[in-house]
Amino acid sequence: MTSTPKKRRLWLLNIIFVVVVGGVLLFLWNAPPETTPRLPNNENHQRFFDMDRKEAENFCDSCHQPDGIYPLPEDHPPTFRCLFCHKLPD
């Protein structure tokens, strides 16, 4: 019994699918660990834990500017989405 061209094509597509999914899983498995520090769990930041993320981000610039309490490095990304990277503590 020989395979028909449709069956061969179906097998080929299934193999390609498995290889692509395996490649994606391997890529995700080898992803680097999260290195961005979380929002500190201290009295300065405690009031922001109960706020919505967007609302809390409005206050970040008050302390984290060049002349603020804790200035950010010059190569730091824009501060309009602070809590996108700096997650709340667990």
Image (cartoon, grey):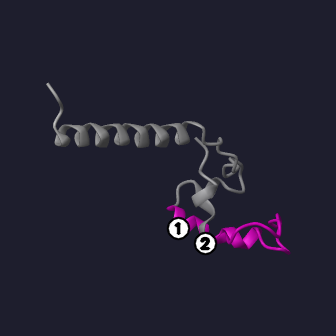
Looking at the rendered image, the quarter that the C terminus falls into is: top right
Determine whether 26 is above or below 51 in the image: above
Residue 10 colored in magenta in the image = no
Instruction: From the viewer's perspective, tell me whether residue 85 is left or right of residue 16.
Output: right
Please name whichever residue, 73 or 52, is drawn nearer the observer in this view of the structure. 73
The span shown in magenta is 52-80
Of residues 13 and 77, the one nearer the viewer is: 13
The image shows residue 33 at horizontal and vertical percentages of 65, 41
Give, as a three-letter code, the residue at label 2.
Asn
In this figure, which residue is indicated by the disc labeled 2? 58
- Residue at x 53%, y 62% (from the top left corner): 53
Label 2 crowding class (10 Å Cα cut-off): few <14, some 14-19, many 20+?
few
Residue lying farthest to the front in this orientation: 2
Name the chief secondary structure element in magenta.
loop
Q: Quadrant of residue 1?
A: top left
**Can you say whether 53 is above or below 24 in the image?**
below
Q: CA distance from mark 2 to mark 1?
A: 7 Å
Q: Quadrant of residue 8?
A: top left
Which amino acid does the dot numbered 1 rest on? Lys
Around disc 1, counting alpha carbons within 10 Å, would you say few (fewer than 14), some (14 to 19), or many (20 or more)?
few
Circles 2, 1 touching at the beta carbon (< 8 Å): yes
* Residue 87 in picture, x, y percent from top left: 60, 52
Furthest residue toward top:
1
Q: Secondary structure at mark 1?
A: helix
Q: Which residue shows up at 27% across the image and 36% down it?
A: 11
